[in-house]
Amino acid sequence: MQVTFSKRSTGQIEFGIIYGSMACLVIGAARVLPILSIAPSCVFKNITGIPCPTCGTTRSVVYLAQGKIATAYAMNPLAATVLIAAVLYFFYSVITLIFNLPRLGFILNHREKIAVQTTAIMLLLVQWAYLISSR
């Protein structure tokens, strides 16, 4: 893995701002809207009786919006982590954009990309096992 610091180039898409804005909007919506009363129930859980790998995501977002971090992690640890990371990455992206600072980047070779993908799948499976065992 190669770590780089580079200035933003003209026309470069700011994914941190795009995805971070979406995460902030989701948290804001969960704060002011009655999300839990209008969200549909999990079809997978209704059919199989076991929670799907993403069960609890909506509740996790609502609890994050209310500032109940521990409860949000109890509902869906992976969703809470990803949402918090997206918000933090949003602020990092905004700061580097405003002050024209070099951005941290990573260059992965093929083997490292496969390792990252495998880790993501393993985290999802571990999360699923957690959700099944905690319900």
Image: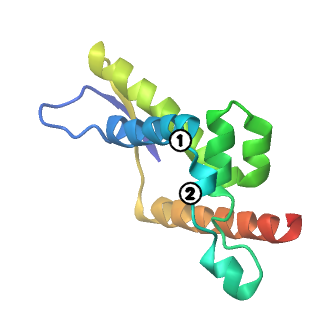
The image quadrant of residue 43 is bottom right
The answer to which of 38 and 56 lies nearer the viewer is: 38
The answer to which of 2 and 115 lies nearer the viewer is: 115
The image quadrant of residue 115 is bottom right
- Residue 65's x, y, as percent? 61, 35
Tell me which label, 2 or 1, sits earlier in the chain.
Answer: 1
Residue carrying label 1 = 33
What label sits on residue 60 in the rendered view? none
- Residue 98's x, y, as percent? 28, 16
Q: Residue furthest bottom?
A: 47
Residue at x 58% of width, y 68% of height: 118
Residue type at mark 2?
Answer: Ile
Q: Secondary structure at mark 2?
A: helix
Do the CB atoms of the residues marked 2 and 1 lie less than 8 Å apart? yes
Residue at x 57% of width, y 35% of height: 31
Q: Classify mark 1: residues with Cα within 10 Å, few (<14), some (14-19) or many (20+).
A: few
Residue type at mark 1?
Answer: Leu
Residue carrying label 2 = 38
